[in-house]
Image (cartoon, rainbow, N blue to C red):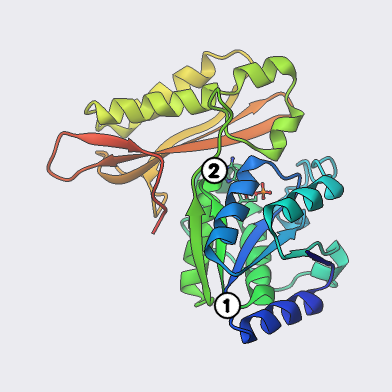
Amino acid sequence: MRVLTTIGETRAALDVARAGGASVGLVPTMGYLHAGHRSLIDRSVAEQSLTAMTIFVNPLQFGASEDLSSYPRDLDADLAMAEAAGVDVVLHPSVEEMYPQPILTSVAVADVSTPMEGASRPTHFVGVATVVAKLFNIAGPCTAYFGEKDWQQLAVVRRMASDLSFPVAVVGCPTVREPDGLALSSRNAYLTPEERAAAPVLHWSLVAGAAAIAAGERDAKRVRELIADLVQAEPLAQLDYAEVVDAATLQEVDPLAGSLRLLVAARFGRARLIDNQGATVVAGSGEAAPTEQGAPG
Ligand code: AMP
């Protein structure tokens, strides 16, 4: 495994690999790797001849009052996991390498970025889209693997790649969970034991919302309220939002129809956690099925 710190070396390594006939998989991360990241790496290693992972805590996507300085980091453990998983190239650049001068050019993906995470974290998705655009330009033609855990991010990245004709196929990978339903997240490290015990309420409230849709509920407001009430019944949770939206556009749908995504965000002490769940209303039928698979189009 090669561990690189510069854009130039990484671009050269991947260009040489492609020239030799390799297909390139790209797994962008902020490090502090867990089994969710590992699932993305495993998929890339299975599908591509070379896997490149990036580890970069991107200041641009953190708000002024957010956890940039305290974001958990463990480069040695990350490199050990990456090597064991079969990663070929790691790019771990400094902030100066990625942003040698103040950014005057940024990428904003309208509409998909606006609700939910975009409303709560107004500069977040410009930061995400801009760094992912840079990583796509550094990596060159490749298949990039992102987690469905960050559903809105996946939708933003897909739309950016399509709108700007990046030579990158974006693949969404299912959310990896703890046995009690909590989605794996680097930010779970912030949870006290009591908060950790309470946090699976996010998943189970979404499962209940999807079950209500499967049972015939078509009123978006009632589904939102069902999820919100379940989260708010947990004293350690401070709800940020509970939404049910079109899975691809992230816009409201009422009455509920088509491919839907239920999304929730809440704070547990220091940790702000997000989760989501799919549901599909089949046209012309009273039937609906909760879905975990399927990516925004
Ligand atoms: P992060 O390091 O949090 O920026 O995440 C890097 C990538 O891993 C993103 O594409 C995330 O969506 C993905 N990811 C994070 N947690 C999970 C999880 N529990 N299951 C699947 N993918 C995940």
55 left or right of 95?
Answer: left
**Amino acid type, residue under disc 2 in the picture:** Lys
Residue annotated with mark 2? 149
172 left or right of 57?
Answer: left
Q: Quadrant of the C terminus?
A: bottom left
Q: Residue at x 56, y 67 (%)?
A: 48
Is the CB–ligand 1 distance for label 2 below 8 Å?
yes
The residue nearer to you, when weighing 81 against 163, is: 81
287 left or right of 11?
Answer: left
Callout in the foreground (1, 2): 1
Q: Position of residue 226 (x, y in %)?
A: 39, 22
**Amino acid type, residue under disc 1 in the picture:** Pro
Is 242 above or below relative to 106?
above
Q: Secondary structure at mark 1?
A: loop
Viewer can see residue 121: no
Residue annotated with mark 1? 141
Distance (Cα) linking label 1 and label 2? 24 Å
Q: Position of residue 150 (x, y in %)?
A: 55, 46
Q: Quadrant of the N terminus?
A: bottom right
Circle 1 Cα neighbour tier, 10 Å, few/some/many (<14 / 14–19 / ≥20): some
Q: Residue at x 47, y 23 (%)?
A: 204
